[in-house]
Image: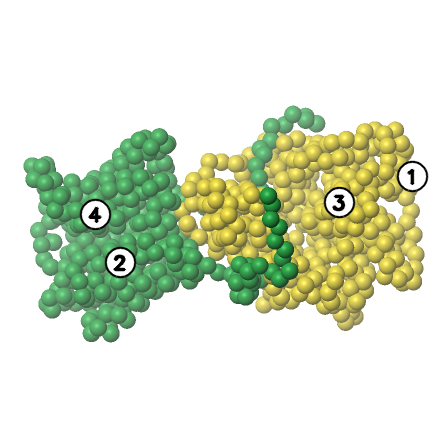
Amino acid sequence: MVKTFERGISIPDYKELTENMPIQDLPQPSELIIPLRQHIGAPNRRLVSVGERVKAGQIIGDSDASVSAPVHAGLSGIVREIGSRLTQTGQLEDCVVIEVDPEQEELTCTADDATKLNKDEIVQRIRAAGIVGMGGAGFPTHIKIKPQTKVEYLILNGCECEPYLTCDHRLMLEYADEMIAGARILSHLLDDAKVIFGIEVNKQDAIDLVRAKLEKEERMEVVPLDVKYPQGAEKQLIYAAVGRSVPPGKLPAEVGVVVQNVATAKAVADAVIYRKPLTERIVTLTGSAAVQPGNYRVVIGTTLAHLLESTGGLKQDVAKIIMGGPMTGWAQKNLEAPIIKGCGGVIALTRDQAVAAQEYYACVRCGKCVDHCPMALYPSYIGMYAELGRYDLAQEWGAKDCFECGICAYVCPSHRPLIEFIRQSKRA
Amino acid sequence: MERNLSLLVSTSPHLHAGDQVATAMKDVIIALMPVTLVACYFFKFNVPFLIMVCILTAMFTEVLFRRLMQKEPQLSDCSAILTGLLVALSFSAATPWWLAAAATFIAVGFAKEFLGGLGWNRFNPALFGRVSVIVFAPWLTYLNNEFFYWRVSFPGIDTITQATPLTMLQMGLPLPNMGTFFIATQGGGIAESSAFALLLGGAYLLYRKHITWHIPVSMMATVFIGTALLGQHPVYHLLSGGLLLGAFYMATDWVTSPITKKGQIIFGVCIGIIVVIFRVLLAPTEGVAFAILIMNAFVPLIDRLTKRLKFGEQKEQVISQHTVPAGTKMTVKN
């Protein structure tokens, strides 16, 4: 019997397009657009100026604020511009634009003896590498591993519950050792918290592989989880894996749990053992309009245009391009946005697959959104009150506790833009 | 690569399960086909005629009211057709067409469109229309005189002059054989022709997941237990009158029933209790319709009373939300 959480929904996962495609390198881009802020927290100030030469791995933006993470240049080159550029969310962010040197120096990182480091030094290395949650949230990792309360469990999130995405799946298969090393480091920082790898059973090969590698580990185990959306949402994952409920407005650490994405754990190992900054990530390029779907190693700052051009372009009838997952990601109006630390997927859809914003109708109170809401909220009422401008009542029915998984709008037979209504209610 | 692509931009989620309101409406119409066919067998052409009158009236009324309210007609959601069909089925086959048309007009025009259209109505439109012509019967009699020469009657009507099983039950007359009664009986409303056909349609709705067991089962169980306790024949009560039609097709109406399963059970039980009161103590007709309409009014209250806790929320927290935490300072701005 595999574990899971209450409510939620099963969605066709479309992962067969890329789940068996090994990670490939992308040809080197000629330009990088690196947003100075790729995390939740204080914005970074730029540390380079226009015309300056930057080395691969050099810090180009940082902040003195504690909740922040530096950003690095992934490749050497010359800073051509610093200014507002379009990012994946559709908002403008300050970006450093680097003209990449065609000839790159081979960057060699050698392992040094991390076991001699004390905890503060390890945390310092994690921060210096600019590591943030790579599942999409982008919360700085060095903050998350210094909780105020005693942590009993470290859960490694390998659910990848968003349809289409397979980057974490491939990472678990191809970088299992690094991921486990990262988990060991994180567990050490959390006073030897027990490690649980939460993986959905649609990735049986990853479950088997990680299990085999953990055979001799006493304080690490794999917990197979049901294939259900949003299994990888932090609170839902904690409930499924260890049976604890995080109260509204509280952090997981308050119930003794810290969750980290599997890709984050791998990045931690790179940072602590090899002192390698976070300058690349695995991105799943997929969807019916992608010519060469696959899992690609992409330098942070690579534009959508380069990613698509170097993988054969787009099919003729492309209608929608999404950055992130299909349930929570952002539709792009052009190909300018760069890949950032938290972006795990680019999904290009043909007209027949793309859902367009369409006319919506009044709520018919079918109750599907209420039945499936993982937070046990009432999207139906929230939407109705938001439409009437009664945001106070929308909040009374739970608007502020929504993490926008998208299920309510996914199931709505009246095609109501419920997530949009909820966002309005939160802002009010 | 061409950079001037024209791409769709919309907010997340970018997937949809594909459910449509119209699909559900069409499925309810399909679910009502078995009982309609049985009724056609008994009452011949009177049944399709009455259904046609009601559906056309429903569609006409929706267009009329939406035009008056300067809104686009929304016939494609099929809700007008379904309301028309439900109104027709709630009458007996001998009902004059103008009376059924008046009920449909009230159902679609006032109970639905006037209140804002599908989704905003508080009462089940079909039942509201049906009950209105009973309540306003004294005023509607003039219709009977006006339209008397326009009456339409086809062969097959004579069979329904006999007493309905429910009145037989009330009057203590010998009841028909249970088996025949279950498969098909003549008498009463069109939809009372076959309990079996109604259950078949109900099963289809459950299979298609448009309804869940909560309302029909809680409602029928309450009637069964209630009538048994009062010394009546529970099975006859279950199979006769509008109970099955009400339990599977009327009380389960999405718009006018509670949104949570817990609320739906409370709703079903309360309807059951009111049905028992009506059937045993009050007038023998339309107890189910009145019971459902009465409980429709309580749906917002039931929703509020059965409001569940959010994920991870404890009972004490709900209370503490309304109290000021210790140490809160009050600032007064001038």
Chain for colour green = B
Going from the N terminus, do you reach mark 3 or mark 1 first?
Answer: 3
1 vs 2, front mark: 2
Position of residue A377 measured from the top left corner of the image (x, y, whole percent): 52, 54
Between the residue at mark 1 and the residue at mark 4, the CA separation in whole angstroms equals 85 Å
- Is label 4 in a helix, a strand or a loop? helix
Proximity of marks 4 and 3: CB atoms separated by less than 8 Å: no
Q: Amino acid at mark 1?
A: Glu
Q: Quarter holding the C terminus of chain A?
A: top right
Mark 1 nearby-residue class (10 Å; few <14, some 14–19, many ≥20): few
- Is label 1 in a helix, a strand or a loop? loop
Q: Nearer the viewer, residue B204 or B318?
A: B318
Q: Is residue A322 left or right of residue B252?
A: right
Q: Which residue is mark 2?
A: B291
Q: Report if residue B179 is visible in the image.
A: no
Q: Amino acid at mark 2?
A: Ala
Q: Which residue is mark 1?
A: A105
Q: Is residue B77 left or right of residue A88?
A: left
Q: Which residue is mark 4?
A: B132
